[in-house]
Image: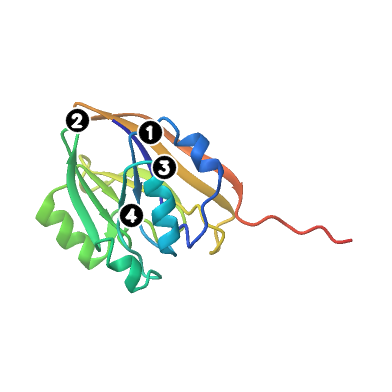
Amino acid sequence: MKIGLLSDTHGYLDPKIYKYFENTDELWHAGDIGTPAVMDELEAFKPTRFVFGNIDGHKIRERAPEYQCFKAEGLNILILHIGGKPPGYTKQAITLIEEHEPDVFICGHSHILRITHDPKRPELLYLNPGAVGKAGFHKVKTIVRFEINEGKISQMQAIELGPRAQKKLRS
């Protein structure tokens, strides 16, 4: 199973994602979607799992849960928008991790790309794809793609899509 992972679109989809995600089976969006149009566009492209983020209004929250817990190719996956980072998770993330015992914990919110194992839970893989939208303080738009086969993750790639905002040339 090939996965495309993104977060923090804030209402903007970089057209480059279509090239990088063309061979994926599913997309997983870790929140701060921004507009229902982003959801529509991603769902028209690939099957997509979403969670809502702190900027997402009621129209998005009607279509996306606060968190998702599911199995993919033998791995337990947990996605929550605001999760902190290992080992300093949010209280909600700690509760969900203890309750669901995921193999992979995915969150967004920080706009900082991070892929690491939790030092206190070495069996737990932490993924934050950074931010792919134009809003925020990140300097570079990032996404992640990887494969899951029989309970193993492989082909993990962090991909930079270029600067968050194009500088305008002065005339």
**C-alpha span from label 3 to label 2:** 26 Å
Q: What is the spatial separation of the Cα atoms under label 4 and label 1, in whole angstroms?
A: 19 Å
Frontmost of labels 4 and 3 is 3
Assess disc 4: are there few (<14), some (14-19) or many (≥20) residues with their C-alpha within 10 Å of its C-alpha.
many
Dot placed on the residue nearer the N-terminal end, 1 or 2:
1
Q: Residue furthest left?
A: 99
Q: Residues within 10 Å of mark 1 (few under 14, many from 20)?
A: some
- Earlier in the chain: of badge 4 and badge 2, it is 4
Q: Are marks 3 and 1 in contact (CB under 8 Å)?
A: no
Left or right of 46? Residue 19 is right
| Three-letter amino acid code of the residue under disc 3 | Phe
Q: Badge 2 local density, few (<14 within 10 Å), some, or many (20+)?
A: few
Amino acid marked by disc 4:
Cys
Image quadrant where one finds the C terminus: bottom right
First in sequence: mark 3 or mark 2?
Answer: 3
Q: x, y percentage for residue 137?
A: 55, 63
Q: Earlier in the sequence, mark 3 or mark 1?
A: 1
Instruction: Read off the residue under disc 1.
Output: 24
Q: Indicate the secondary structure of the residue bearing disc 2.
A: loop
Amino acid bearing label 1? Thr
Residue depicted at x 37% and y 48%: 43
Task: Please give the residue where the numbered disc 4 appears in the rendered image.
Answer: 107
For residue 36, above or below residue 120? below
**What residue is pinned by disc 2?**
151
Mark nearer the N terminus (4 vs 3): 3
Which kind of residue does numbered mark 2 sit on? Answer: Gly
